[in-house]
Image (cartoon, grey):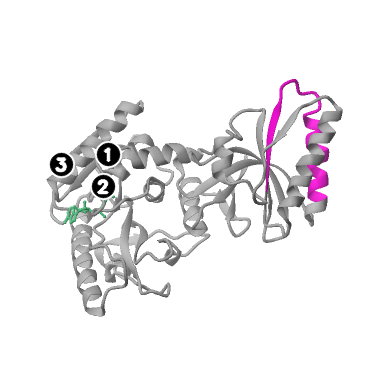
């Protein structure tokens, strides 16, 4: 089957995640990707905000032609429906106003009214409905709640897709905010980013699988891993953090039917010997201290040196404990100098010296995998590699 995925705020990271999980993936527009696969589970993807099954493709279409095609197709498809239908219309990549999208909805509504079918059109605030609104209206989750995702791609082709659901922002926010043990200093890895790091590491590897987070902190990545069905080992230098991770996993177990196992203990990532087989490593490593403004050169050199040392020693330590081909994704710090020019760790260029090789992507280059928000000094660079 062919799906279209609408990518999140950083599309390059979203498409890299899809490529690792599904393989047969390519860019369609600047924020969308075509994915060829048997099934598509948006709940486990951090970088995709909406997805739909491609139902038709039009060539050389502008919005007028596309709109006429939509009205003709769906007035026919729904003419015999008994219950009420809710539809949302989302257009991407067209140079049109929101009024033009609304007009398509109105025409479809009045055509269906003529055949006695009641249609509710979800109001558009923009040419595309926000993923929050799609989620709250449960679009794509039942046959009578449909979102039509219409995307004009780089090549001028237009894809019409029927949504299969959007990112569950309510569940993500709950997992982030309601967990009992949080620590602002250790940092708040957003659950979406945790999913991305896990997927970049594990890719399409089969379960059961033992995943290690050696800098587990409060356990965000462990939480997302067990929800995705992986067994986890979490370790951290700090006993307090290990107890936080444990508390959070117990809390999660109270809310979800978790069937996988977890093991937690305190340990220094630079010299711990993990007793179990490790099939994949996914972690947000030590990021150094947080900064609200770019640090002085001296301070930056100091922090960079500490992070290089800790993460470099960890890479040496783990290399002797995993088999060739074991995948790793590590979020490491990179510092924004204030004008979107970044200072990177030295180890980023030395992975082969430690006995690893970088995993290459078809759609993006490794340097695109830099996760940050405007104004944030410490970005997370996502390194994806495997043991040689
Ligand atoms: C950026 S935080 C990770 C936060 C985590 N992703 C979470 O969900 O809270 C980095 C963690 O690395 C731990 N740490 C620092 N140096 C370490 C070392 N040498 N070995 C193991 N853990 C270490 C810190 O205690 C901290 O919890």
57 sits left or right of 379 in the view: right
Say whether residue 318 is left or right of residue 191.
left
Disc number placed over residue 232 in the picture, else none:
1
Q: Quadrant of the N terminus?
A: top right
Q: Secondary structure at mark 2?
A: strand
Q: Which residues are magenta?
A: 65-90
Of marks 2 and 1, which one's residue comes earlier in the chain?
A: 2
- Circles 2 and 1, Cβ within 8 Å, touching? The answer is yes
Residue at coordinates 22% horizontally, 65% vertically from top-left?
Answer: 307
Q: Earlier in the sequence, mark 3 or mark 1?
A: 1
Query: Badge 3 local density, few (<14 within 10 Å), some, or many (20+)?
Result: some
Q: Which disc number belongs to residue 265? A: 3
Q: CA distance from mark 3 to mark 2?
A: 11 Å
Would you name the residue on which mark 2 appears? 213
Q: Position of residue 300 (x, y in %)?
A: 25, 74
Q: Is residue 379 above or below residue 141?
A: below
Residue in the image at 24% along x and 53% along y:
186
| Comes first in the chain, label 3 or label 2 | 2
């Amino acid at each position: 089957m062919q799906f279209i995925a609408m990518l999140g705020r950083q599309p390059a990271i979203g498409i890299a995640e899809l490529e690792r999980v599904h393989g047969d993936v390519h860019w369609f527009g600047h924020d969308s990707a075509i994915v060829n696969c048997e099934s598509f589970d948006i709940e486990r993807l951090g970088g995709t905000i909406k997805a739909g099954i491609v139902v038709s493709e039009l060539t050389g279409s502008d919005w007028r032609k596309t709109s006429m095609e939509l009205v003709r197709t769906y007035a026919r498809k729904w003419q015999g429906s008994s219950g009420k239908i809710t539809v949302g219309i989302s257009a991407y990549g067209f140079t049109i106003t929101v009024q033009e999208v609304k007009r398509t909805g109105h025409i479809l509504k009045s055509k269906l009214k003529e055949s006695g079918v009641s249609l509710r059109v979800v109001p558009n605030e923009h040419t595309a409905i926000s993923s929050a609104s799609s989620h709250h209206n449960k679009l794509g989750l039942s046959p009578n709640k449909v979102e039509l995702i219409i995307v004009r791609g780089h090549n001028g082709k237009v894809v019409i897709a029927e949504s299969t659901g959007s990112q569950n922002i309510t569940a993500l926010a709950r997992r982030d905010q309601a967990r009992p043990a949080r620590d602002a200093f250790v940092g708040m890895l957003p659950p979406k980013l945790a999913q991305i790091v896990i997927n970049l590491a594990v890719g399409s590897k089969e379960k059961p699988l033992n995943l290690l987070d050696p800098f587990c902190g409060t356990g965000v990545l462990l939480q997302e891993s067990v929800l995705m069905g992986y067994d986890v080992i979490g370790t951290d230098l700090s006993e307090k953090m290990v107890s936080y991770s444990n508390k959070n996993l117990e809390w999660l177990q109270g809310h979800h039917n978790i069937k996988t196992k977890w093991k937690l203990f305190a340990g220094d990532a630079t010299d711990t010997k993990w007793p179990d087989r490790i099939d994949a490593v996914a972690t947000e490593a030590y990021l150094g201290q947080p900064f609200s403004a770019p640090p002085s050169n001296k301070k930056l050199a100091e922090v960079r040196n500490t992070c290089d040392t800790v993460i470099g020693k960890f890479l040496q330590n783990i290399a002797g404990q995993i088999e060739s081909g074991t995948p790793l994704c590590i979020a490491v710090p990179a510092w924004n100098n204030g004008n979107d020019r970044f200072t990177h760790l030295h180890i980023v260029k030395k992975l082969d010296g430690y006995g690893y090789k970088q995993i290459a992507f078809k759609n993006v280059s490794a340097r695109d995998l830099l996760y940050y928000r405007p104004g944030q000094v410490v970005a997370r660079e996502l390194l994806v590699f495997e043991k040689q």
